[in-house]
Amino acid sequence: MKLDHLSEVLNFIGGERIPAISGKTLSNPEPATGKLLGTLPASNADDVSRAVEAANEAKASWGELSPEVRGFHLENLARGIEENLEAFARAESIDNGKPIAVSKSLDIPRAAANLRFFAGAARFQHEEAFRTRLPGDDLLNVTVSRPVGIAGCISPWNLPLYLFTWKIAPALAAGCTVVGKPSEVTPVTADLLARVAIEVGFPPGVLNIVHGTGPETGSAIVEHPQIPAISFTGGTATGASIAQQAAPIFKKTLLELGGKNPTIIMEDAELDAAVEGAFRAAYSNQGQICLCGSRILVHESKMDEVTSRLQKRINEMVIGDPLEESTMMGSLVSESHLEKVESCLQTARDEGGEILVGGERLSPEGRCSSGYFLTPALIRGLPHSAETNQQEIFGPVATLTPFANEEEALHLANDVRYGLSASLWTSNVDRALRMSEKIEAGTVWVNTWMKRDLRTVFGGVKDSGLGREGGSESLRFFQEPTNICLRFNSSR
Ligand code: NAD
């Protein structure tokens, strides 16, 4: 199968790749070069309605299949991705600017793993039953679940295929048909997935992909009366507007939003591992992961050492062409995002922060000389209340803040509007549990970062989201339970 043609992304509706009804397109630049990569459909409500029609037609037959048969189809998609891993990884790096080593080892294998995992998880889902004995009554309560219908799945640009499949896989496994919208900033690998779906004979109409902007295409999905559930991953402001649209029409929403996650290094931490963990958490994927640890909180006795070690690691970083195997940091995702991150750096300066290293545009030699590169920035000297420490930047920017004791570390960790994740570095197991239970976040890693078991719950508290994904939580979101209460008459 040839997947090297990346310039024309199309919608995938009813099993066919087609342009937008209006014929309009959006341009898709390659961030590492600043040159035009290709186009994608500028879909509107008409395209969404067409996708809903296709999803409606396929709904009954897909929903009636056994989990085993649905799993078989999902596994075919997973295999199709795995067999074309090189092509998918290359496309993801070209479209997003991320290093090819990251696409190959993280994004694409995880996309296949998402499909395989939910193919299997649906087979193990069980119904609940309660025998209820009351005076004169003998009851059996059985809760049965059915698919909600058509699922709307909307995903962001930072982990494009990884997060798109994280949404569509449980929806499909739960028996829903899907109208999905990947980010307009990184549409290419979802289009490759559509090509794989055609190749492996994935049932037409079950998975539909509509490309376009959030306000036009995304909003049309959220508003559509025949889509009862929206699973969304993206920014907090977008999540709030989706929640506003969905609430009056009583639409189910699952919202995975932004983060401003702390990395907490206690005085008893094993320092080599902690510094490496803090470095990876701050700058992986150009700092463009919702789980990135952009606030590095360090016990005051270790601050000097952690600071100099982090500076050294930053200076050693190989930044440049995402398609080079040795590249550790690629380009930011777009020119506008680069400008946004630069304006956040200006705010940090205005607030009195000292940029110890990085924060400058970079122009690598060769084909990437006009790309959107920024050297990773490490900032100190800002009060905890500074905007730089409170707002998500979503780029390669981290701050250092000292603390004197456990209580202060917890206060700093929790005193933000977000609550997605945290990583805590300590060699004291009692402290690890004590502190973890007090950190306001959906995930707390102790002595590690970003390790995921897909069976575990995932999500955020406060402004980081609503609801949980992962394992059976993801499947349940796409299902509607009904409790059937059966009365037995034992005297008959
Ligand atoms: P975004 O909110 O701008 O866009 C996300 C998706 O929503 C895109 O497909 C976009 O087209 C669509 N969209 C935008 N406006 C919409 C609207 N009004 N109605 C419906 N859809 C709309 O986010 P982004 O810039 O693509 O991604 C970065 C953000 O995503 C960061 O805040 C990051 O923290 C967050 N994120 C969260 C998680 C998580 O699991 N919590 C994971 C990755 C990224």
Image (tube, rainbow, N blue to C red):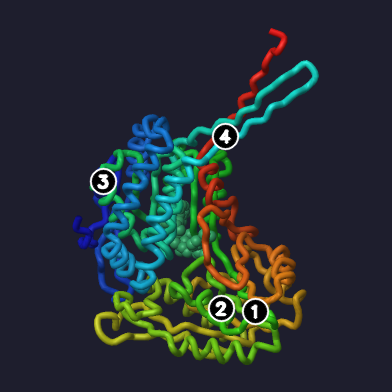
Residue found at x 50% / y 33%: 146
Location of mark 2 (residue): 278
Q: Could you tell me the amino acid type at mark 3?
A: Val
Sequence-earlier tag: 1 or 3: 3
Q: Could you tell me the amino acid type at mark 2?
A: Ala
Sequence-earlier tag: 2 or 3: 3
Tell me if label 1 and label 2 are in contact, CB under 8 Å. yes
Q: Could you tell me the amino acid type at mark 1?
A: Ile
Q: Could you tell me the amino acid type at mark 4?
A: Glu
- Disc number placed over residue 265 in the picture, else none: 1
How far apart, in angstroms, are the residues tagged by discs 1 and 2? 8 Å
Sequence-earlier tag: 1 or 2: 1
Task: Specify whether 381 is left or right of 192.
Answer: right
Q: Secondary structure at mark 4?
A: loop
Q: Give whichever of 216, 226 is nearer the camera.
A: 226
Q: Image quadrant of residue 240?
A: bottom right
Location of mark 3 (residue): 200
Sequence-earlier tag: 2 or 4: 4
Q: Secondary structure at mark 2?
A: helix
Residue found at x 34% / y 42%: 73
Location of mark 4 (residue): 127
Sequence-earlier tag: 4 or 1: 4
Number of numbered callouts drawn: 4
